[in-house]
Image (cartoon, rainbow, N blue to C red):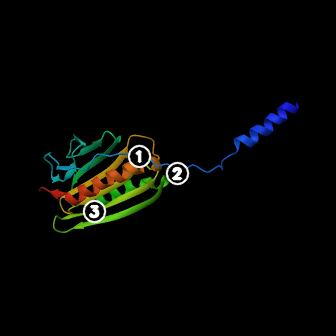
Amino acid sequence: MRNILLLLFITTFLSCKEDVLPKPKAYLSLKYPKKEYKTLDLKRPYTFNVLKHAKIINEKNNWITIKYPKLKASIDITYRPVNNNIQELLTEAEKLVFKHTTKAEQIIPKDFLNDTKKVYGSMYEITGNAASNIQFHVTDSTKNFLKGSLYFYAKPNYDSILPAVDYVKEDILHLIETLEWQN
């Protein structure tokens, strides 16, 4: 018994040489490809610049899907002609944004106005574990209406996908800034 106590006493003194410190915070080391853009090469009532390494899926009704295979994400873009129904289209787009309020922590709007190109719209950044973290719509208010949504093909975990959301957000902003109507 005495030997066990002596062994415990020696072990305690020999093992406690350093102060215990918390581990430093770790950050993800995510590397994304350098941004290079090209003009959308599909015949549509609109054109804009898109990331070169993104995969463009041609859909019917002038819709497209911009896929980011490495990020497991896509921007789904829908097009609708304006036929004296601009208010209906705007209301529908905003309803889709605010459907996410149950999961969203915050919805941050950003408005766009380019009189030269006749591009007017809004982008909504949706923080939290929502199904879509960015939604936007742009219009010329008389003929064309474009709506886009960013989706990730994974269970929503905002903290984990935030770097990817920020990466694609730059592309969405670039898309809006380079958008031109073709008709």
Question: Where residue 167 sits in the image (x, y, percent)?
Answer: 33, 51
Left/right of residue 82 with respect to residue 69 in the rendered view? left
Q: CA distance from mark 2 to mark 3?
A: 39 Å
SS at badge 1:
loop
Quadrant including the N terminus = top right
Q: CA distance from mark 1 to mark 2?
A: 13 Å
Q: Residue visible at 39% across and 50% down?
A: 163
Amino acid on which disc 3 is placed? Gly
* Front-most of residues 32 and 177: 32
Quarter-of-image position of residue 118: bottom left
Residue 100 visible in rendering: yes
Amino acid on which disc 2 is placed? Lys
Quadrant including the C terminus = bottom left
Query: What residue does disc 3 label?
Result: 121
Query: What residue does disc 1 label?
Result: 29
Left/right of residue 9 with respect to residue 160 in the rendered view? right
Q: Residue visible at 77% across and 38% down?
A: 10
SS at badge 2:
loop
* Front-most of residues 133 and 33: 33
- Marks 1/2 in contact by CB < 8 Å: the verdict is no
Q: Residues within 10 Å of mark 3 (few under 14, many from 20)?
A: many
Question: Where residue 65 sits in the image (x, y, percent)?
Answer: 26, 43
Question: Where residue 122 sits in the image (x, y, percent)?
Answer: 31, 62
The mark nearer the N terminus, 1 or 3, is: 1
Query: What residue does disc 2 label?
Result: 25
Question: Where residue 84 sits in the image (x, y, percent)?
Answer: 21, 61
Q: Residue visible at 19% across and 62% down?
A: 142
Q: Residues within 10 Å of mark 1 (few under 14, many from 20)?
A: few
